[in-house]
Amino acid sequence: MQLNERCGGNVFTVLFAISGLVLMGVPIGLWIFFDDFQGTLKPHTIAWLIASVFVAVTLPISIWEIVMHLLNLDQPLLQVPVIRVLWMVPIYAVDSWLALRFSLAQYKDIGIYINTARECYEAFVVYNFLVFLARYVALTAKPTASPTTRTDSTPGRERPLTPVSEMESPRGA
């Protein structure tokens, strides 16, 4: 086992454990301490703080997965579009956090720019997903003799794929 694999497994285990503790600890902590902060913090601030915790959990895990794809780039034609799609997780996490932060009336003008950037990246991700699908089909397709011919059940007999050849008379006639 290489050093990279051992470190990768250990780091992933630590990140997974921290994420699990945070995901369990935040709701329990809010349930316990909510009465202490009920009069001092606005609900918008509490929501923003909770979102901050989840963004802090999401970013390292998604960045770790992207880095692992880059370190193990065995099939670049397939992995590069996947990496571009994986960037959607941290971008959406940060975008949602910023949208929650700047959702107050005084910051409404900033939100339109943030959402526009997110929508542009979403279109780019859809394009890259289609590129991934096209490359995957191209790499795994079986070669055929000709794209315009097909074989019958009779070996050695080929006929063209035309609408006329498909309109044969019924066998019983």
Image: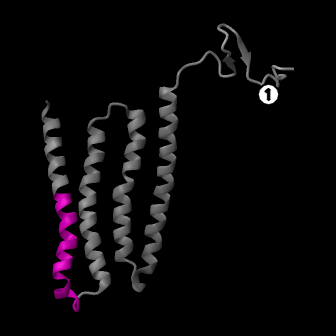
* x 66%, y 14%: residue: 153
**Residue 162 in the image: above or below residue 27:** above
Image quarter in which the C terminus is found: top right
**Is residue 54 found left or right of 21 in the rendered image?**
right
Residue at the far right in the pictured view: 173
Residue 8's spot in the image, x, y percent? 17, 42
Picture quadrant where residue 95 is located: bottom left
Q: In the image, residue 114 lies at what x, y percent?
A: 43, 68
The one nearer the camera, 128 or 11, is: 11
Which residue corresponds to the image point at 73% horizontal and 16% vertical from the top-left?
Answer: 159
Q: Residue furthest front?
A: 172
List the residue tagged with mark 1. 163
Residue nearer the viewer, 28 or 17: 28
Q: What percent of the width, then of the height, locates residue 80?
A: 39, 40
Q: Residue furthest bottom?
A: 39
**For the stretch drawn in magenta, what is the main secondary structure?**
helix
- Residue 41, by quadrant, is bottom left
Q: Amino acid at mark 1?
A: Pro
Is 167 in front, or is 76?
A: 167
Q: Is residue 30 magenta?
A: yes
Residue sitting at 84 percent across and 22 percent down?
169
The boundaries of the magenta stretch are 18-40
Where's the N terminus, which quadrant?
top left
Q: Residue at x 36, y 56 (%)?
A: 89
